[in-house]
Image (tube, rainbow, N blue to C red):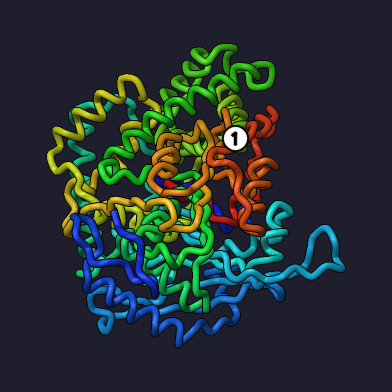
Amino acid sequence: MKAAALYSTAGSLLLTTLAAAPAGGTPGTPSAPGTPGTAELRGTAVAVARARAAGIDFGPCSAADVPRTTDGPRCGTVSVPLDYAHPGGKQIKLTVSRAPATQKDPHNSKRKVPRQGALLYNPGGPGASGMYFPLVGTVPEWKRIAAAYDLVGYAPRGVGRSAPLSCEDPKRLFKSPTTSPAHPSEAYKRQRITQAKAYARGCAQRSGSGLRFYNSLNNARDLDVLRAALGEDRLTFMGASYGTYLGALYAAMFPSHVRRMVLDSAVNPDPHRVWYRSNLDQSAAFEERWADFRDWIARHDDVYRLGATPAKVQHAYDTARERLAGKAAGGKVGPGQLQNAFLMAGYYDDFWPSRAAALSKYLHGDPEPLVRLAAPSPETATEAENGRAVYTAVECNDAPWPTDWKVWDRDNTRLARVAPFETWDNAWMNLPCAYWPAPRQQPLDVRTGPGELPPVMVLAAERDAAAPYQGALEMHRRLGGSVLVTERDAGTHGIGGGPNRCVNGHLEAYLLEGRLPARHASCAPRPEPVASGGAADKEARRDALKGKGAGR
């Protein structure tokens, strides 16, 4: 699942088994299904050598990439092969942004901080751009890291101006109002099947024969080319959400090229869960997080007047859905738009006050806050459509999916009985993969033994819905020598560089000093959001800068 709606607002918020490689870092000869092929490995070596020789010519950023400021990031491009098996064939250009290390100690202006190289960031998705990431260095929680590292973001293949993918006319994406039945009828299911088939055909027609090359293994190869273009012998990387899977693939494919790696809100790398079963796990976890949100609203009934029990809050939400089905708020916000807005509360509890306030005011006669919060933004349609196209292409290409609708219907019908909040919307998001026109891959079995890889830091919130905690445990188990830092009893998606000082202490100690906690460290949760009657969003600027919200 991808939170496309949140990521599309990032711009406005600103102004989410291989053996060890031999010496030289080239992985060994593939021998198992899902293992990268020899031709691709050779092609990666060719592309890496080219990129190291060419470097990156950084200059002013395009306004389409990063807002232009006198002391802001600089931007450039890096060429990578569309098909790594044919490195001399078609090349695509990835856009890159960089803010040099300030080398200024934020606590002692007279102290010069040694530069440690580049920190490359991927915000997830798949389909999110990290071009804004260098601006996060202005946030207090990131200034120590920004002093030591060049902060580097990029738009992965297919995203933004990096050989962009498209699957439909962007004007169709924000068609509203829409419905969102928790228990769809057979007629509605047939309608969504027709739409999924049309979307899959559109991806092939609008994106051409190169569609198959937009996948996670190529994204990992692109990381190695970016590393070389930046002049780094080893990669320091931070990935959030889907970016953790990307990082895990890189660690398995190029273990000797890793310097330090942070995997924030880790998804489950078990090849049997990529990606069909992972989405079912996600839907179940969103039900639990929706319960957390309803409980919080109920405890603040004096502010929101939506009911003093979670059941009464659910009744209030269902009442709003029924009313919106009869008459869309502002002519634009129906049940589908309401659901999309409240899904964001499953990702980030910073969103809880604004969503609760908007729902309360709507039910008490004032629809305007809900319209402002949930109505589609046509000016972001192109970016959002592009993000969804990349998400779909990468996930559909990465792994086998059930091609029999009866399997989807059986699994999601069963799950929706106990987890109705998001199950079917998640299924419709991914259903084009049942009818995908490009070849499927077998997922790489990510495993590294002790000593094969420098220690990796995995960060996770215990009640994260978008990346259920079991995935972090599996990631920790599969990456030998890794450490896991858990934010207990918390559910925000993406915890590094946030308000939790304990988490940030571990993150800084690792990135700045290479110092690790025990194999499994635990942090108390961040404070709950403060209930407020205002409807204005107070989402953290920090998360917008990092492009969070496109996370899986």
Q: Position of residue 121 (x, y in %)?
A: 52, 61
- In this rendering, the answer to whether 405 lies above or below 362 is below
Residue pictured at 31% horizontal, 33% vertical: 424
Q: Can the viewer see residue 238? A: yes
Which one is in front, 229 or 2?
229
- In this rendering, the answer to whether 547 lies above or below 118 is above
Q: Quadrant of residue 101?
A: bottom right
Decide if residue 403 is on the left or right side of residue 68. left
Decide if residue 406 is on the left or right side of residue 35. left
Number of marks: 1
- Residue under numbered circle 1: 522
Q: Position of residue 33 (x, y in %)?
A: 18, 55
Q: Quadrant of residue 336?
A: top left
Q: Position of residue 482 (x, y in %)?
A: 48, 48
SS for dot 1: strand
- In this rendering, the answer to whether 503 lies above or below 285 is below
Q: Can the viewer see residue 369? A: no
Which one is in front, 484 or 398?
484
Residue pictured at 43% horizontal, 71% vertical: 161
Amino acid type, residue under disc 1 in the picture: Ser
Decide if residue 437 is on the left or right side of residue 285. left
Which one is in front, 464 or 177?
464
Q: Quadrant of the N terminus?
A: top left
- In this rendering, the answer to whether 110 lies above or below 546 is below
Q: Position of residue 439 (x, y in %)?
A: 16, 59
Residue pictured at 40% horizontal, 56% vertical: 246
